[in-house]
Amino acid sequence: MSNRTVRKGRYGVDGPGWLSGLFAGVAAPLLAVAAGGPRWLLRIPPVVAAPAGLYLHSTLRGKFLVWEEELDALRLSGDEHVLDLGCGRGAVLTAVAHRVPKGRVTGVDLWRSVDQSGNNERATTDNIRRAGIVAETELLTADMRKLPLENGRFDLVVSSMAIHNIPGAAGRRDAVREAYRVLKPGGRLLIIDILHTSDYLDALHTTDAVNISRTGAGPRMWWSGPWVGTSVVSAEKPPADPGPGEPSHPDPSEND
């Protein structure tokens, strides 16, 4: 059953510089021809318009649809503690918070507007208010590569279109290992991102993570086309070992 979030906030666009560049590729040739430039320039806008449209769809609608489906599939119980890495203006944070009314959601970001338009803590706080969140929320300014958070704190760690902004494969792997570090035993990790997701898999394979997977998010998150597609990376932290004297699995006789 879907727990589809009604979006009431203002979430900006991802990578505004890239989107501006695409739309400039449509507008500039038209303006040049209007100013007396050669008419062959009119061949350019139709070629650029399709990638620009796909990008715009991904940032304004597609990513929301993908996240709703992925969060529904987790079948959260409603009391989880969740961490959103690179939370930006709170699109995923608010969607998660609606699903954990008895839980707590923490968002971490460096609030860089180059990565998301209008990205600042005040905008995120305003979107949380607009969404009418019941769950407790907390926002932290911190680097994903070195989180000021204790081990094993969260039932779920999510990240959307954020870790790829970290320069260098080593830095990206550090961020993924930090995400895994703060997971509770039995906790789950869900990352939706572009470009460098093989680095995330490399980092997870250096841990004791299980059920590591990477799948494509499909055309709804094509950032200009399939050549800039999106991947869904997921993993789980194994449950804690049973304590001394505790059975490692249920005793079948208890059900007799």
Image: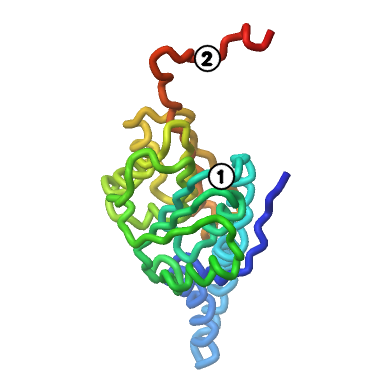
Residue at image coords 47%, 36%: 187
Q: Quadrant of the C terminus?
A: top right
Of labels 1 and 2, earlier in sequence is 1
Tell me the SS state at disc 1. loop
Query: If the image is split into quadrants, where does the N terminus sit?
Result: top right
Residue nearest the viewer, comparing 91 with 224? 91
Whether 65 is drawn above or below 72: the answer is below
Furthest toward the bottom, the residue is: 35
Within-10-Å neighbours for mark 2: few <14, some 14–19, many 20+: few
Compared to 204, does 252 lie above or below? above
x and y percentages locating residue 162 in the rendered image? 41, 56
Is residue 91 in sight in this rendering? yes
Q: Can residue 48 be seen in the rendering of this structure?
A: no
Which residue, given by chain and number where applicable, does mark 2 sit on? 249
> Could you tell me residue 76's position as x and y percent?
60, 42
Q: Nearer the viewer, residue 194 or 54?
A: 194
x 45%, y 63%: residue: 88
Q: Amino acid at mark 2?
A: His
Picture residue at 56% right of the left edge, 71% below the top: 10
Helix, strand or loop status at disc 2: loop
Relative to 242, does residue 196 appear above or below in the rendering?
below
Q: Which residue is mark 1?
A: 79
Residue at 40% of width from left, 42% of height from top?
A: 153
Q: Position of residue 15 (x, y in %)?
A: 44, 66
Choose top left, top right, bottom left or bottom right for residue 239.
Answer: top left
* Tag shown at residue 161: none
**Direction from residue 231 to residue 149 in the image, left or right:** left
